[in-house]
Image: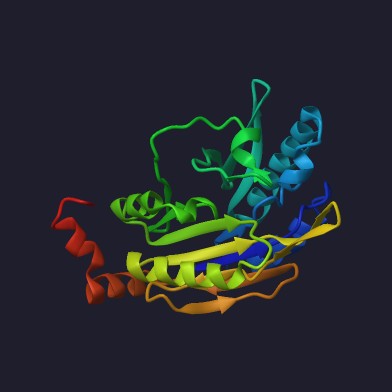
Amino acid sequence: MKLAALQLSTLPMSEAKLDYYFRICEQKGVELILLSEYALNSFFKELESMPILMIKEQTNHKIKVLKDLCKKYNLTVVAPIVLIKNKKLLKATAKFTPKSVHYYNQQFLINFKHWNEERFFDNPIETYVPQTFMLNKIRFGIISGFEAHFDIAWMEAMKKNVDVVLMPSSSTFDSSLRWQELLKTRAFLNSMYILRANRVGTYTQKEVSWNFYGHSKLVNPFGEIELSSGHKEEILLCNIDKDEVNRAKKLWGWRRDLSKRDMI
């Protein structure tokens, strides 16, 4: 099955750029596209000072664009998005198909002093529920970049027998090598693919530049990086193979050993 990771900065209101990339994906036989964080909406630090009506307009327009393009090119798209419900802001991930849209609330939010999404958004604190769906007999799970730091996300993904984790992120500063090792380790220990789409571009605040470095990656179930992108706007086209997932499960047996202890 062919997938694509599209690493972007915030998209303009025009649909031209997405139409260009989606057309390429259709031509290449891609069935699912993953967008990086804060591609449909402005970056978080910009949202903090935006009127809620402006955020709502941005969101509604991008939802319409994605619905139309998925129908036009017969694609499934997974993309982070900011939802507005009853004047409350929710950080979510949307799954667009040619026929429907489903939304999943992010369940762990960044709460650092310089980047506090937990305080800004109104996501409810609930029991962690894995965000999964089936496409062509492959089970996908959605784990955001920040959620990737928590063991429960991976344990639940194993319980749901996920084959491929889709990971939108907006990582910056000097974290690229750390992320590379994290992805390799999680893919290997969980016997699953990880496709990460990381943001690009720059945000400047008080003479400090937040450089989003891209480096989107496909990591296979053996913990090996199969493909990696550069640091600018780019589309990463890749293939996944369910047989590779099954081969890793059989060879290493991590999931089998856990199941003996009633943990999955």
Residue 42 horizontal/vertical position (percent): 76, 46
Left or right? Give the position of 31 relative to 68.
left
Residue 35 horizontal/vertical position (percent): 64, 56
Residue 256 horizontal/vertical position (percent): 19, 63
Question: Considering only vertical position in the picture, is 129 above or below 171?
Answer: above
Left or right? Give the position of 143 relative to 117.
left
Instruction: Report the front residue among 103 and 1.
Output: 103
Instruction: Report the front residue among 49 and 101.
Output: 49
Question: In the rendered image, which quarter is residue 164 located in?
Answer: bottom left
Q: How is the image coloured?
A: rainbow
Residue at the extreme left = 260
Question: In the rendered image, which quarter is residue 154 located in?
Answer: bottom left
Question: In the rendered image, which quarter is residue 121 located in?
Answer: top right
Instruction: Report the front residue among 136 and 188.
Output: 188
Residue at 60 percent of width and 56 percent of height? 169
Residue at the extreme top = 86
Instruction: Report the front residue among 180 and 62.
Output: 180
Left or right? Give the position of 159 relative to 89.
left
Residue 118 visible? The answer is yes
Q: How many marks?
A: 0
Question: Considering only vertical position in the picture, is 96 above or below 246?
Answer: above
Residue at 59 percent of width and 66 percent of height? 4
Question: Considering only vertical position in the picture, is 46 above or below 264?
Answer: above
Residue 41 visible? The answer is no
Residue 85 horizontal/vertical position (percent): 63, 25
Residue at 76 percent of width and 40 percent of height? 47
